[in-house]
Image (cartoon, grey):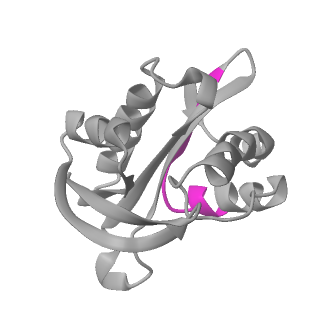
């Protein structure tokens, strides 16, 4: 079942996210996110954009959300879209279902542009974005530093 996230989902979402924080360059955060911080992020995020979770028998398997691209008023119709799937549920089709529904909800809010920001290389994320109609519009070289190496970041765009 896919449903809207609530602040009560914070602990499970933090557990999913922290795997990526601690073990990959997919997130450029250095420290694990506390349940309290995740609760704040969810509550704040829901005030502007959708946050969705995939749930089976009370367990959360992944989540997707949109967030403002920039605080500047001129960018208010553009959002960054984000997806995380629990490590043991990757490649099951869950991510694409979450992301499709997220895009539908963003589109229904009359927003104009969705942006996917991808640490590279990440062929799975690139394939997911392109399957949903995003197209690569740019790549920044060596803008992130994590796990002892420089990381490029690509930008994929979907005009809604």
- Residue 4 image position (x, y, % from top left): 58, 38
Q: Which residue is painted at 58% across and 55% down in the image?
A: 46
Tell me the residue at 52%/55% (across/down). Answer: 25
Check residue 82 for magenta coloring. Answer: no
On the rendered image, what quadrant is the N terminus found in? Answer: top right
Q: Give the image location of residue 133, x and y in percent.
A: 18, 41
Direction from residue 77 to residue 99 in the image, left or right: right
Q: Is residue 81 above or below residue 132?
A: below
Picture residue at 62% right of the left edge, 64% below the top: 29
Residue 127 placement (x, y as % from top left): 27, 36
Q: Is residue 117 left or right of residue 82?
A: left
Left-right relation of 33 to 113: right
Of 88 and 41, nearer the camera is 88
Q: Is residue 111 visible?
A: no
Instruction: Give the number of callouts.
Output: 0
* Residue at 18%, 55% in the rendered image: 136
Q: Which residues are magenta?
A: 44-55
Find residue 9 and report its horizontal and vertical position in percent. Answer: 74, 40
């Amino acid at each position: 079942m896919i449903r809207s996230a609530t602040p009560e989902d914070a602990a499970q979402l933090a557990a999913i996210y922290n795997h990526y924080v601690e073990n990959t360059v997919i997130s450029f955060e250095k420290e694990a996110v506390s349940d309290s911080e995740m609760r704040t992020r969810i509550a704040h995020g829901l005030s502007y954009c959708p946050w969705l979770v995939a749930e089976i028998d009370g367990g959360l398997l992944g989540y997707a959300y949109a967030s403002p691209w920039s605080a500047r008023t001129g960018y208010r119709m553009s959002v960054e879209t984000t997806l995380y799937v629990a490590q043991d549920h990757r490649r099951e089709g869950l991510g694409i279902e979450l992301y499709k529904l997220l895009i539908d909800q963003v589109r229904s809010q009359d927003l104009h542009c969705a942006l996917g920001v991808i640490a590279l290389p990440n062929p799975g994320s690139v394939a997911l974005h392109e399957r949903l109609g995003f197209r690569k519009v740019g790549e920044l070289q060596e803008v992130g530093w994590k796990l002892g190496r420089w990381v490029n970041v690509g930008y994929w765009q979907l005009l809604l």
